[in-house]
Amino acid sequence: MQLIECPWCGPREEAEFSYGGQAGVAYPADPAALSDVEWAHYVFFRDNPKGRFAERWSHSAGCRRWFRAVRDTVTYTFEVTG
Amino acid sequence: MTFRTAAGGRIDRGRTLTFTFDGQTFTGHPGDTLASALLAAGRHAIATSVKLGRPRGITAAWAEDSGGLVQIEEPFAEPMLPAATVELYDGLVASGLPGQGRLADGPDPARYDAKHHHVDVLVVGAGPAGLIAALAAARGGARVALVDEQSEAGGALLSERETPEWVAAAVAELAGYPDVLHLQRTTAFGSYDDGFVLALERRTDHLGAAAPPTVSRQRVWRLRARSVVVATGAHERPVVFSDNDRPGILLAGAARTFLNRYGVLPGREVVVFTTNDSAYDAALDLHRAGARVHLVDARAAGSPRAAECAAAGIPVLAGAVVTGTRGVERVTHALVAPYLGREPAGREPGGREPGGRQPGGGELGADEPLPCDALLVSGGWNPAVHLFSQVRGRLRYDESLGAFRPDEELDGLTVAGAAAGILDPAGCLADGARAAASLGFDAGALPPVPARGAPAAPLVLWRVPDATGATQFVDLQRDATVADIARALGAGLRSVEHVKRYTTIGTAHDQGKTSGVVASGIVAELLGVPVQDTGVTTFRPPYTPVAFAALAGRDRGRLFDPERYTALHDWHVAAGAVFEDVGQWKRPRYYPRDGEDMTTAVLRECAAVRTGVGVIDGSTLGKIDVQGPDAGAFLDLLYTNVMSSLPPGTVRYGVLCGVDGMVIDDGTVLRLAEEHFLVLTTTGGAAKILDWMEEWLQTEWPHLRVRCTSVTEQWSTFPVVGPRSRDVVAAVFPAVDVAREAFPFMAIRETTLGGVPIRLARISFSGELAYEVYVNSWYAAAVWERLLRAGAGYGITPYGTETMHVLRAEKGYPIIGQETDGTVTPHDLGLGWAVSTKKADFLGKRSFARAANLDPQRKQLVGLLPTDRETLLPEGSQVVAYCPDGRLPAPPVPMLGHVTSGYRSAELGRPFALALVKGGRARIGQTVHVPVGDILVPAEITGPVLVDPEGARRDG
């Protein structure tokens, strides 16, 4: 079981964390202005890279804070970015 | 005839243990395993094989044994243990296992537990490399764990004629360090990221009847180490030849273990067949113990150690191999033939060479039978790289070893000693010291170990040439042969992973400890490719089998998942409630009176609520306290309707959607003050919705000044429901004006009872006049009792979740998770009225405008009334188009939807259901069919509100 470095609590077991998908997918400023396709891309479409991937994580069984990390999907290297 | 030596070994000859095997009584000594005690009695055969029914026996001295599987019968049934790993105890009853085992019929009375432990250095394996590494780390002040699967430390040194004295001294020294955890009988079975290792400690079995009942039988250790030293040794590898599966055929190193550690001669007339120098020690030790030994060395040049054998009088046949055996229950002869060279690569057994000569036939001379009662085999050694490989350590095929060894340094995990391919004790010691040094610990001067001469190069020989390989067993436990591998290759398989699954080689209890690398070598040989290219199948945890009971530990029965109780739980139990699980909560489902079944009780409770008054413990509803200057704006973004316009002291029902517009939860929102809301969620959705709120507040709307906290357990909630509820509430809370106009629907009133703050809210989940009573959970029981006392004159009836469900369904109120499944919008549920058209945005709003959400053929919530007025439509039933002939048409059947809730209604006097039906609202009045069992039940589609559609009862 991997250790994840919570920015608030330090290294904890991965089972204490929950995954929040791709980071940097902002809620659109004006959803009404988007076409159906643009809105669908916000709701449903996410990248699936081989390699480094910016993700959202939450220390859900600990301090309950959300943070960002870059995880390498090949090596599982986990780099908290705040 | 006993095969026990007169002296020697690490057993306690002063004590005798009695045990039963296959109905026969045997004896042994403390320190024996079941295998060594059976061998001491001359018993090699253990069982017959699973597919072919061939007699099989003990082949190895530990978990790599692929032949000697037993079923423990007493004291507690346990299947599929290698006899070589069962420590002997008095009263053991076991039998040989032909393949599959048998689980116990009764519940396991033993206790299993788990323990977490954190260290600087974890050393796996207490052989020479592991011991020296652990000592160095301990002396350096590190927190150390040393785990080893055997009953005592020493590893391969335990199989020497004399175990060096420093081993015991090292164990004693380790015991003196307070920060060293040293566990024997503990198998590290899984290696994971960041120095996490799972190990299974066998704590009591070896004590037999003396095992203290208070001690857990097995313990799973969850070890987390900054650095892991894998010093797990090596497994000896057989050479495959025809009829190599007969009882009496053992690995040579195992025979040496049985002799030196357990004082048992595996045979008196012994043939040793080897490709390397290690078996010379077995030959010499057995000879010295009185056996007649012939040594057959496949290498044409033999070994310089042949001189030692010659001096001892052991005949050595160099450049010869064992081609086959004779015997049934026990090997009687080894067929020995001159070995003239390798079979040319790239040919499959059974194939014909030009000229009709059998492949391989030219490479062997004529065989001659050598009488024997034991045949010891060594084809070299496979480093036990499992823990390294499980964390994706890369392996490399080493041609000189004929085996795979670690090919990289991993961060935080180092492999030392025989596990790294170093096979002599002195080299292992030095490598253990190197591993310690790599972690910054100095091992100092190294203790003495038995010396070995410089070994002659081993010969890598996977199998002896044979025309078909039909009885050349690669995996004894699976009855899988060289012919099976050839068949797999003939079927076009090339990957060893595919060959493994086609032949089942390496899939038995031993997971290919002796067969895996041999199978890779044979595949490579038959395909004519380098072994490095075929590779070896993936090593996965567990290293050895682990019982589910051990993995479950204490997390079973009532401790499997937390049980949550309301403050009234004891009252519910005393009242005879039947409970149901709602999330982790135990909620009363109904309160049966004398002899009532659920149907009768629920009909009674429903009628009482609709005609008099009932009360329910609604305390499990999720409650989230939302406070802050932006609380209203925050809730406006989350809910489909407007919450910021709610006057303090009032309540509004709201719906929560995901950004995809699908309903995720619903409930009432109480505005207690300008900047203070109490949000109610479904019982099961409470934690999820609090997380949902936090996620949006932290990630998208950090500018909003809002704080959320769970108060579910702080507030108990009792809806008092029914036409007489006003009388009850008025009696208990006299300070509150309960008149219809003074305390209107969806209003909140604060009061006190005996000085305790009470909140009342006129919320109804049944359509009846109703008051929710909120009180600090410390006072829940007192308030509940007062409500019951005040309602006694009106026949107040406590009711459970089943009645609550019926009452809400009669009103068409959906339950999130029952009427919905993540594909249902508020509009589908008929809750379009709760979706704001005025707000600029809220979660889900944009999705409602998508074409798919505007489709009139979406499934919509409707009511269903079976026209026979009798049949209860089970939840989950399909709704299909009406079939005029009363039969389902041929597929595809025109499916319209499904039943989400189905109940008997006291009020309607008939069963009814809610259903999601395609274009349902446009079908109101139509009749559809619902298949129930083998019959089609006609049902009329109605609006979802079946009781009091005008809402006349709400205000009493």
Image (cartoon, rainbow, N blue to C red):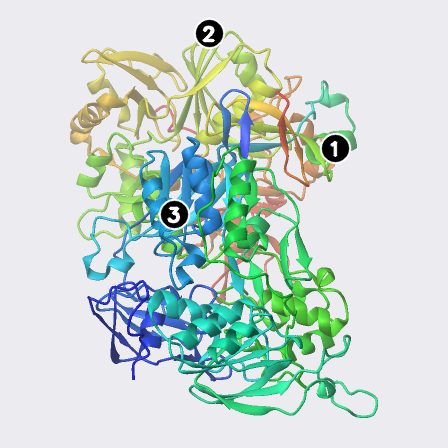
Q: Are marks 2 and 3 on the same chain?
A: yes
Identify the residue position indicated by label 2 in the image.
B674
Q: Position of residue A71 (x, y in %)?
A: 65, 33
The CA span between labels 2 and 3 is: 54 Å
Q: Are marks 1 and 2 on the same chain?
A: no
Q: Residues within 10 Å of mark 1 (few under 14, many from 20)?
A: few
Q: Tell which residue pokes out farthest to the right in this image.
A: B354
Q: If you read the primary sequence from the N terminus, does the residue marked by circle 2 or circle 3 appear first?
A: 3
When asked about the image quadrant of residue B438, the answer is top right
- For image coordinates 34% across by 35% down, the residue present is B177
Which chain does the residue under circle 3 lie in?
B
Which label lies toward us, 1 or 2? 1
Q: Position of residue B399 (x, y in %)?
A: 69, 62
Q: Position of residue B287 (x, y in %)?
A: 43, 77
Task: Tell me the kind of residue under disc 1.
Answer: His
Which label lies toward us, 2 or 3? 3
Which chain does the residue under circle 2 lie in?
B
Specify whether B55 is left or right of B490. Answer: left
Identify the residue position indicated by label 1 in the image.
A41
Secondary structure of the residue carrying tag 3 is: strand
Q: Which mark is residue B220?
A: 3
| Position of B142 relative to B484 (above/below) | above
Task: Tell me the kind of residue under disc 3.
Answer: Val
Using the image as rendered, state which of residue B180 and residue B652 is in the foreground. Answer: B180
